[in-house]
Image (cartoon, helix red, strand yellow):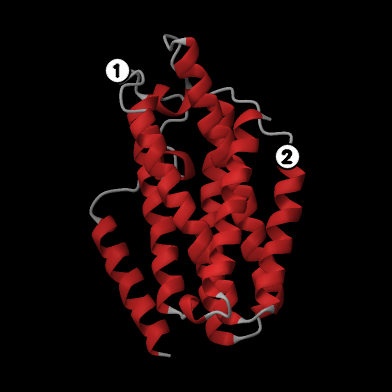
Amino acid sequence: MLAVLLLRSASAFRRTIHSAAPLASAAYTHPISPSDPAVSSTPDGLTVEQRRALDAALRIDQAGEVAANYIYKGQFAVLGRERATGALIQEMWDQEKKHLDVMNKLQVQHRVRPTVLWDAAKVAGFGLGALTGLMGREAAMACTEAVETVIGEHYDDQLKEMEDMAPSHPSMPLLKDVIREFRDDELEHLSIAVINDSQKAPAHALLSSVIGAGCMVAIELCKRI
């Protein structure tokens, strides 16, 4: 119960901070001008290497958000009836739904081919979520901790890679702000998992290592396929 109260306080504090300035994702979820080049065009002056890096980044991010949605869907299918745990999973899942909606719009805007592993990401995500849910609340939180650790680091790497990528085109500063926002959301999910006993899961170190390694393999596959 204390963990739930802490989470609600942290979430309320975070919403208060962001209320003064709109989130970057609002440009896609609540667009003021759909024809704004920042949300409707992609840079034309990128080098071949930069274009390849941008395509790979958005392909991975979109696939990752698909998998994340299905992980939480699987966990909720098993643990959703537990009042406190179900509420935690639902809150994180709702954020992931928004992430996927925005990534789908970015994929169209920047003319990126989605990964052919889309359906595999759904199946693997749901299976991982359901399996860790069946292992218990702590294991489900350990799954979240492991996944969000990898994703947080991955978003940081992307921001470094995009640092000098077409800074004068309005879509690129917005894209980087969206990635920062989503990184912060994922790290918040990591904190939620730790607060809610992820590290008390049976064989926590082994479970985290296996899930983390799986995430990194998935990233490399989606980058190429």
- Nearer-N-terminus badge (2/1): 2
Q: Name which residue lies at 59% across and 25% down.
A: 112
Horizontal placement of 64 versus 180: left or right? right
Residue 194 horizontal/vertical position (percent): 42, 73
| Quadrant (top left, top right, bottom left, bottom right) of the N terminus | bottom left
Would you call the spot at circle 1 few (<14 residues within 10 Å), some (14-19), or many (20 or more)?
Answer: few
Q: Is residue 104 visible?
A: no
Q: Nearer the viewer, residue 217 or 10?
A: 217
Residue labelled with disc 1: 168
Q: Nearer the viewer, residue 132 or 1?
A: 132
How many angstroms separate mark 2 from mark 1 (CA)? 33 Å
Residue 215 horizontal/vertical position (percent): 58, 50
Q: Name which residue lies at 40% across and 50% down.
A: 183
Q: Secondary structure at mark 2?
A: loop
Q: Nearer the viewer, residue 124 or 177?
A: 124
Question: On the image, which quarter does residue 219 sit in?
Answer: top right
Number of numbered discs on residues: 2
Residue 176 horizontal/vertical position (percent): 36, 35
Amino acid under label 2? Leu
Q: Secondary structure at mark 1?
A: loop
Q: Is residue 150 visible?
A: yes
Amino acid under label 1? Ser
Residue labelled with disc 2: 117
The correct choice, above or below, for 143 with respect to 111 in the image is below
What's the mark number on residue 213? none
Q: Name which residue lies at 66% across and 32% down.
A: 114
Residue 97 horizontal/vertical position (percent): 57, 54
